[in-house]
Image (cartoon, rainbow, N blue to C red):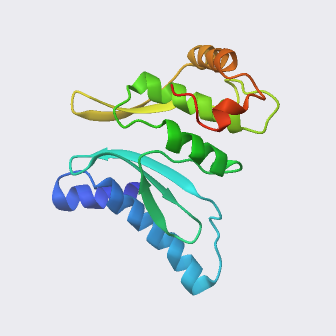
Amino acid sequence: MRLIAQRYLLAYQEPIPVEQLVSHICDLQHGYTMYGGRRPFGVSMLFMGWDKHYGYQLYQNDPSGNFLGWKAACIGSNSSAASSILESDYNAECSVEDAVKLCIKVLYKTMTMSKLTSDKVEVGILQRKDDKTYVRIIPQSEVDLLIKEAEATYPKGSDSFAKGSEKT
């Protein structure tokens, strides 16, 4: 990825658009599927980024090399339940804080582990400041507080949340 991005920067004197970088990665995956009959990467991935053409972007790919753009997405076990919650509760005009709370809410209600804790998840926020894009990782102490808030607001076993009747 870095080499592709650096070649683009050298040729055009601007950072590579996010969708174009994702497309290059997916072309590589697709090539292995088409010509080798294998899928050595064997994973789905979520890509987030920012460029001057489309602003903030989120893409999901699959092992075959297909990719789609989303406003909100999740992959893995129980992703259909998580997607349902995102579909009902996502608001394009929400603040960063509300978006993080929604993420914790989705994880809390859909992860199959015994208890959601901050050492099992990492929350990152893609931000722009002073014309630079960076990822800020939320400290574990803040994640712990968000998890406690989710536990108090959405007790396990309450199906009202799963049906998407409550909004954040």
Q: Nearer the viewer, residue 157 or 150?
A: 157
Q: Quadrant of residue 135?
A: top left
Seen at 31% across and 44% down, the residue is: 50
Residue 30, image x, y percentages: 51, 75
Residue 5, image x, y percentages: 33, 56
Q: Quick one: quadrant of the N terminus?
A: bottom left
Q: Residue furthest right?
A: 114
Q: Nearer the viewer, residue 6 or 138?
A: 138
Q: Nearer the viewer, residue 68 or 65?
A: 68
Is 49 located above or below residue 91 in the figure? below
In the rendered view, does 144 fall on the left or right side of 54? Answer: right
Q: Quadrant of residue 161?
A: top right
Confirm whether residue 122 shows in the render: no
Q: Residue furthest bottom?
A: 35
Residue 84, image x, y percentages: 58, 46
Confirm whether residue 72 shows in the render: yes
User: How many numbered marks does the figure carry?
Assistant: 0
In the rendered view, does 63 fall on the left or right side of 119? Answer: left
Seen at 61% across and 35% down, the residue is: 106
Seen at 40% across and 66% down, the residue is: 24
Is 106 located above or below residue 36 in the figure? above
Is 138 located above or below residue 109 in the figure? above
Residue 111, image x, y percentages: 72, 38
Is 41 located above or below residue 87 in the figure? below
